[in-house]
Structure formats: structure tokens, C-alpha cells
Image: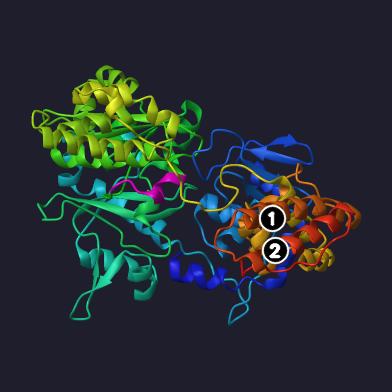
Amino acid sequence: MSQAAWSIILLMIDQSSIETLKQRIDIVDIIGSYLELKRSGANFKAVCPFHNDTTPSLHVSPSKQIYHCFACGAGGDAIKFVMEYEKINYPEAIEKIALMNNFALTYTTSTNEKKPDKKLLEQLNLFFTQNLDKTPQASSYLSQRGIGQSSIQKFEIGYAPASYATLNFLKQRAFTSKEAIEAGVTGVNENGSEYARFIERITFPIYSPSGRIVGFGGRTITNHPSKYINSPQSKIFNKSRLLYGYHLARESIMRGKKIIVCEGYLDVIMLHQAGFNEAVATLGTALTNEHLPLITRGEPKVVLSYDGDNAGVEAAFKAAKLLSSHNIEGGVVLFGDGMDPADMVQKGMADELNALYNSPKEFIEFCLEHIAGKYNLKNAHEKQKALEEAIAYLRTLQNTLAQSYIGMLSSMLNIKSNLIVLGTKKPLRQNSAANGFEDMLELSIIKTLLVQPFLIDIVLDTIDVSMFKVHMEELSLLLEGEKEHPFLRKLLLLDEIKVYEESELIGAMIPFLYAFYEEKLEKVKRSAQLDFKKKSFLLRKIRDIITRLKKGELVPYESFSAF
């Protein structure tokens, strides 16, 4: 069906039907259908599919019916997981989960009837594939490129005829102009006339990772200035989050822990034809952060398979920098002499391709060589620029990893290794617990208030947010009512963080307060800005508080902002 009709129907799923579905589903069953879950105490763990996870960072709680990744912060309920994993919207996720659980949803429309799914893109794809057999010129082109009939069928390659023919087909199938435009298959010109977006082009249907057709790519065979075009950006088509052929390559990627990222449709098709079933391609765009959740599913090693011309080398450099900065393993294979993977397959060079893909130039080495190659190293000023750029790049890597490449860089630049000083990488602080849970006492106080909010007055009477050294941000979020924030959701799933009873909370707060006022006392003693009278007053005040704390008495918080 068209995207417009699809959206109308799904957005009108009866709310009571959705609530009934929510009550019946189990988050463990839902996530377990996508990931391998392993029991961990009362919860389950899995390798997180939303980042380049190296250990099981995703926790799933059956009792709370939530999931949370302790590495990247992804989390929510079962519906949120399906939305994020499948890259679909909320109503589509409801439909997906209902199908998984054999649950019949009910719909409300203006006529109280469920409309049929007309599948615009699917029908149009069938129209294109049938047209291929009727177009000798298109079939001849594919044959000349070495694409076999089995590959044509596997990738559902078709042919888009003249604009009027496509428009007539859509009209005959009762699709409206609005539906076709929203699906990205037609447009309207400046004169207000509708036209087909794919005209006299070989077509390549583009699927989502879950196997739903979301758009098309088209290659001209009539020397049109735009050799390749894709469907326009839409609610269902985002080329920066899609990889051509992924739905066909997924099983091989997961099994072989390897993904080959190419630059074009034909490279993917020919590589699959030669047995490289883990090949995919970006859709005429550079590799970006938006591709990473998909590219890193299953933790495969990534092989960038790019042309060796200037544009290809620059694209490989940018992609290698991106991947290595995210600690993703893999390497680069560049093709020169006017050859690309498709050409090599056509010439029967599958063994040579296999050798190349099994020994790519590792990302970091490739990046350093590329940086060094940009400069005239015989010139001292140029060499200094190369050193500065290389150091800036290495600082984007994990510290230990970056340090291990100092020797390689010193050799490339022909300088002493002691001249390469990386310093300590200081990652941006996205949350105070980013590098581990530095203060378990602070976290236990916060978790106690999450689970037992009636104890909040005891805490707020004696503790100010500013007294938290490490987890001030999490306490602030709690006090602001942001209980669904990933930082706080994470705490609920951590069994090692204790929830105090009231007496335990008081007992834990006393040493917390004692340490705070002891530190404050030392600062007052050392202060050179305070006059004698002010310093004497503060010393007596703080010592009195410390004495009372030693006796086990909770002392109301007082601000020392004047100090």
C-alpha cells in the first residue's frame, strides 16, 4: 500500500487494542527474537545492536519490562526496541509486534472499516521487473556488465519506462497522486504537472533492514546527466540510514562477522554473484554516523571497498576516520587501474578479490599514511603540519590504541618518537557515570529516591545538589522529574547499586556529610581570602556540624556560598 494510506491506517489503530497488546507482550520474548539473550541474575544481557558493543551491555528486565544499554544509553520498552532496531515508526512497530504475537489489532477509520494494503511500492517494483524483459536495451546493458539472470531475480532488478507509462500504471491501480508523491515515485514540476521520478532507468529496489521495500535506485541507460538517482527523502526512505543489499547480506554478515561496504549497486550485485554475500553499499552518500547502528549490528569487521581515484580515496579516508574513532575494527581496499569489484568479478578475478578483502589496509594505518602523503615531508613546515594533523587524529582514538601507533607515525614522518606527544584524551562528559560508576554512595542515594520517593525530604533537608561530586547531574534529573532519562533508567537495572531502607539511608548519609564538611573545613583553613573574623566564624560553625555528625545526628544543610 502507499505510505500515505499506510500512515492513515496505522495511526488509527484503536488505542484500547494497543493497550491490550502491551499487556500481553513480554519484552524478553520480543528482544529475544532479535538478539541472543543470556540470563544474568533476575535480568538478561545481550550484545547491544545500537553501537559497536564488545561485551553484553544491553540489560533486559522482565520485572520492569524495560531494556537499557549501559554503554550507549539506548533503552525503553519493547515497542521502543522494535522501533529502533527495525528503523520504523510507532504504529509500524505496533503492527510488527502484533504479527509476532499473532494478535489481531482493531482499527478505527471514518468508515470503521479496515482498508486493504495496496502495497504501492511492491506493485510498482513488479511493474518495473516485468518491463525489464520487454526492454532489450536494458537487458543488454546488464548482460554486458556480467550480471546473470539469477542475480537479476535475487536483486529484483527492473526497468522504469517513459513517465507516462508509469503514471498510467499507477492510475490503473487506483493510486492517487498524493499517495505516489508521498511514496517518492512521482513529483510535480513547476507547471503543476505530475511526472514519474524514474524514467528510462534500470531500477534497483531498496529495502529496509527488516525486508520492507522503501524506495528505488535508478541507473540511466540513455546518457542522462544524472547517472544514478535515488528515491527522495521521505517518512520511510532515509538514505543515510540504509545500505543497499543489507536485507540480503544480513545473514552472511552475522555468520561471518564481516561486512564489505561498497560504493554502488553493481558492485554489490556482482560481489554477491561471486559469493561475497556480505557486500552492501551506501546510497550515493558518504558513510556517516547514521549508518553506524546498522553497520555495527553483530560486531562485524568492516571492509571499505572503494575506488582508488581521488574521490574514492577521500571518501575512504573520511569513512576510516569515522569508524576508527568509534573503535570499529576493519580496513580499506582501494581499486586502481580503472578496475572496480564488479569489473574484477566479470573478469573472473574472484580469488584476487578474496585475497584483497582478507588483507585490507587497517583503518588507523591507512589514515596515518593518507595524512603523511598529503604533505611534502622534505619541508620542515610541511612535516610539522603532517605531525599536527596526525596527532589530532590519534587523539580521537582510545588512548591505549593511539599510543601503540606512535612508532608507526614516527617512522612515516622520520622523526623521533618522543616528539609525538598525544596527551590524555578527555572525552566529552555526556554523563557523570560515563567512565564507570565512580561513587556508589551517591548512586545508592539516587536509586533509593527513585524506588522510594517518600524518603526525598530526609535527603533534601540535609543534602544539596552541589554536594554531589560525581553524580550531580543524575540527582538534578531526579529532582526535575526526569525519571525516564537513560541515566536514571540505568540505575534501576543495576543490581549492585543498593536501595536503602530509611534507617540505612540515614546511616549512609552521615559519612557522606562528614566527608563533605571535613573537606569544607580544610578549605576554610587554607583560605587566604577570608578575613580573621569570617574565618573564625566558619571554622566554629563547621566544627560544630562535624561534632553533631559524629554523634549520629543529621544536620540540616546550610549554604556556605559566602565562602
In magenta, the rendered stretch is: 286-293
Q: Position of residue 558 (x, y in %)?
A: 73, 68
Residue 425's x, y, as percent? Answer: 42, 40
Query: What is the quadrant of residue 336 in the picture?
Result: top left
* Residue that mark 1 sits on: 521
Left or right for 340, reference 486: left
Of labels 1 and 2, earlier in sequence is: 1
Kindly identify the residue that appears in the image at 17 percent across and 33 percent down. 308
C-alpha distance separating marks 1 and 2:
11 Å
Residue 185 sits inside the magenta stretch: no
What residue do we see at 19% from left, 62% from top?
Answer: 162
Q: Which residue is mark 2?
A: 536
Quadrant of residue 332 within the rendered picture: top left
Q: Amino acid at mark 2?
A: Ser
Disc 1 residue type (three-letter): Leu
Residue neighbourhood size for the residue with mark 2, other residues' Cα within 10 Å, grouped as few (<14), some (14–19), many (≥20):
few
Q: Residues within 10 Å of mark 1 (few under 14, many from 20)?
A: some
Q: Secondary structure at mark 2?
A: helix
Q: Is residue 76 visible?
A: no
Residue at x 38%, y 36% (from the top left corner): 423
